Each structure stands twice: as C-alpha cells, then as structure tokens.
Amino acid sequence: MKVRKFVDSVRVYIQSGAGGNGCVSFRREKYVPRGGPDGGDGGRGGHVIFRASRDVDSLLRLYFSPHQRAPDGGAGRGRRQHGRDGRDLLIDVPCGTIVRRADSGETLADLVEHDAQAIVARGGRGGRGNWHFRGPAHQAPLEHTDGEPGEELTLQLELKLVSDGGLVGFPNAGKSSLLSRLSDAHPKIAAYPFTTLNPIIGTLVYDDYSRIRVADIPGLIEGAHAGAGLGHDFLRHIERAAMLIYVIDMAGADGRDPHQDYANLKRELKLHRRELLNRPSLIVANKMDLPAAAENLRVFRKKLRRRVLPVSAATGAGIPALKQAIYKLWKAARLQPPSGGG
C-alpha cells in the first residue's frame, strides 16, 4: 500500500479572474425610433480565497496542483445587462497555514481558526458599458472600457500544526506508542529511530465531551535546531502547541542518561525558539515496565525535583493518570494562550 505524502510547505501560483469588458449596444425596439445607448457593465473577476479547515491535514492538494486560477467575469450585454461575476476560487488549507508572498516574504494571512478566510488575490473590476458615456452632446457613444486584469502572485505556504499539546522526545522514546494509548491515532510503531516521519495528531476524548488534540512531533535529535535529523522541517509544528509533554525513555536504552536527554530536549527547544520553555509542560517517564527504569526514575526525580508521571505505553500502566494530568494542564493552559507561536 502506498503511504500518503505529508506536505507542510509548498509554493503556489495563483491568478484571480479578470473583469469582463463593458458592452457597446444601442436600444433597438419597435416604436422606439431613437433608442439610446444601453451597453451594460462587465462582471467582476473571481477572487482567490484561502480558507482554514480542520478537515484538511496537509498541503498535498496544492503540492500536486500548484497553479490555481479563478474564473473571469462575464462581459456586459445590451439592455444594460450586467455581466456575471466570476465565481470565487475557495481553496481549503489546514488550520495553521501561513500564506506569504514568495518574492518579499510578506505575510498575507495566518489562518489558525477553523473557517477563517483571507482573500489573497482580488478579481479585476468589470469594464463600463457605453451607457455610461451618453450625454446631451454625445447621444451615440461608442466608448466602453475593458475589464481590469486579475492579480498574479507566487505564494509560499507553510503549515504549523495547531494542537493543544505536543509530545516531544528523542527517537525511540515511545511517543508514538504513547499517543496510540491516549487517543484514537494509529501512528507507525517500530523498534528503530524515525519511524514517525511526519507529525501525527491524536484526539483525547473525556467524559465531559472535552476533546484535546495532541501532536507527536518527530525529528528531535541533538542539533535539530540547526537542521540535524528532520530538524526545522518539523520543529516548527511545536510552535503553536499550548502545552508540551516531554516523553523520556526512563529505561536508558543504549546507555542513555534520562536526565541528560531531558536537558538536551530543553536545549534544542530553547535554541529553536526560546519562548517554548515558558509553555505549561508535563514530564512523562516512559518504559517503566523495563528493569532499569525504576532506579533511573529515582535518580531522575532527585536531580529534577519536579513532578514526573511514570507510565508504560507497552502495558498501559499509568495511562489513565497521565490522561487526567493532560486534562488539568489543558484547562490551565486555555487561560493563558501561548504567544509568539506564529
């Protein structure tokens, strides 16, 4: 089975519709021997509009169809009939999409909320018919104006996923397994690094019908802030998360020190965007079913002096308590939305 490609950055070429031309026409009816000018105006060209939708999770469609053009407006007609307006081109993109001009880098829109819309290219105005040019000394005007051309733009679209929380941890820390335990997500799980090659979002559902979206952010290794591993490609997806959930491999596989892993994670986030360290956070000690985990957790807690939630994604131990801790942190984080996440 072919895996669907995840696309979070794409260049697109858009053109709004041109306005329709004005009409040159004269009224000709029986018993009206001196009918005057009655050419109607052209219609407006279609706008190009981007709309954020929670039903879209990737820029894949625009990756394969980067050229987008709105329809032109219709020409005016006799009897002062206005040409039809061009139909607006509505393009759905994922929530969290930033639209920038490719030439200057100017931000045209930052579409975060579901159904948020932005007109990025306006359709040309329709031309005027000869009816507008009539006058006492100019009773048979042949003048009219053509419709204005549409706008042509090259845009760079970048997606920063919108989630309530983000799972951060080094490869093989068990983030994917944890997300599958907490939510309805089914990420790829295997015993080797970088099994997750794109962000995965799972939804945690609670008894009061609250729904919390948590993203598994891949690509964090030492040097990720400078582009190592998957680096910047996915680090930006953590920027909009209201809270962070640090997932630490407490079993210390391959001789790793859990406390050093935690310190390195915070360092990478700080070097990428310092403000991330101010987000509300939880620390999760994963793989507590393995032999060395209990002693490592004792040392870890002694060094850190912070609350640490022990869990095992493999057995499900500690998952209900973690789910409730995420709920409490989410309720608190909603009162203080993150800043600087653009």
Image (cartoon, grey):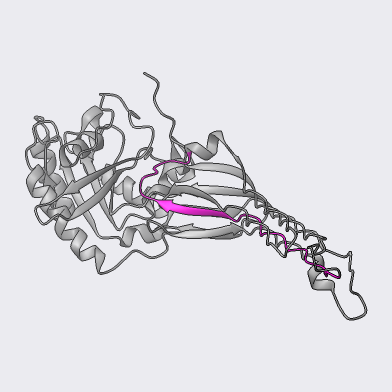
Q: Residue at x 53, y 40 (%)?
A: 62
Tell me the quadrant of the picture where the N terminus can be found: top left
Is 39 in front, or is 332? 39
Q: Residue at x 59, y 43 (%)?
A: 11
* Dominant secondary structure (helix, strand or loop) of the stretch shown in magenta: loop
Residue that sits furthest to the right in the current view: 137
Is 231 in front, or is 83? 83
Q: Position of residue 211 (x, y in %)?
A: 20, 52
Q: Position of residue 71 (x, y in %)?
A: 64, 48
Q: Is residue 228 left or right of residue 312?
A: right
Q: Which residues are magenta?
A: 34-59
Q: Is residue 153 left or right of residue 226?
A: right
Check the image and report above or below for 99 versus 59. below
Q: Is residue 322 magenta?
A: no
Residue 306 can be seen, yes or no = no
Q: Is residue 196 left or right of residue 61?
A: left
Q: Position of residue 303 (x, y in %)?
A: 17, 51
Is 270 in front, or is 164? 164
Q: Residue at x 31, y 52 (%)?
A: 163
Q: Residue at x 45, y 46 (%)?
A: 225
Q: Is residue 288 left or right of residue 225?
A: left
Q: Position of residue 313 (x, y in %)?
A: 14, 35
Tell me the quadrant of the picture where the C terminus can be found: bottom left
Residue that sits furthest to the top in the current view: 1
Rendered image quadrant of residue 254: top left
Rendered image quadrant of residue 243: bottom left
Check the image and report above or below for 189 versus 308. above
Is 1 in front, or is 73? 73
Residue 206 can be seen, yes or no = yes
